[in-house]
Image (cartoon, rainbow, N blue to C red):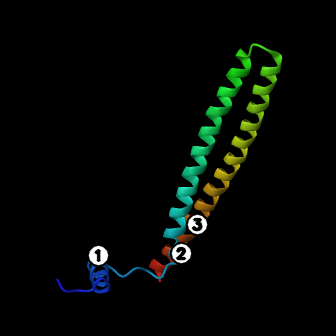
Amino acid sequence: NGRSTEEEAVVSTQSTGPAPSPVPDNTAQLLQLQTQIQQAAQQVQLLGQQAATAYSQAQQAPTNELRNQYYQQYTQLYQQQQQHQATHNNLVSQHTTLLRGSSIASQTAIRT
């Protein structure tokens, strides 16, 4: 159609309706947090599975020495899982705060 990509972008934003309200755009930040939240959740899940495996290996260990090693492994994995859970909770809290902030901002923008 002979238009530059910049012109295309302008045309496409015009055709999608009303002009965006003057709200600070947190979309990129929200998406980044969502990705981090997902990764943290996966870590929590993975470490939980590994800890469970170590625990069951400890219970089935033929010698005390092996049992102790597995319990030690279990303890470390469990502690790591707790740390990742804390990180996850923190990220969720940041995400919620950001969402509330953006929704309040957009409501005020709509009212004025």
Q: Is residue 66 above or below residue 42?
A: above
Considering the numbered disc 1 on the image, is that residue within a helix, a strand or a loop?
A: loop
Q: Nearer the viewer, residue 96 or 46?
A: 46
Q: Amino acid at mark 2?
A: Ala
Considering the numbered disc 3 on the image, is that residue within a helix, a strand or a loop?
A: helix
Residue drawn at 58 percent across, 56 percent down: 36
Q: Is residue 17 above or below residue 29?
A: below
- Callout 2: few (<14), some (14-19), or many (20+) C-alpha neighbours within 10 Å? some
Residue identified by numbered label 2: 105
Residue identified by numbered label 3: 98
| Residue 12: image location, x then y, percent | 28, 78
Residue drawn at 75 percent across, 13 percent down: 62
**Gap between marks 1 and 3, in whole Å?**
25 Å
Q: Amino acid at mark 1?
A: Thr
| Residue 58: image location, x then y, percent | 73, 21
Residue identified by numbered label 1: 16
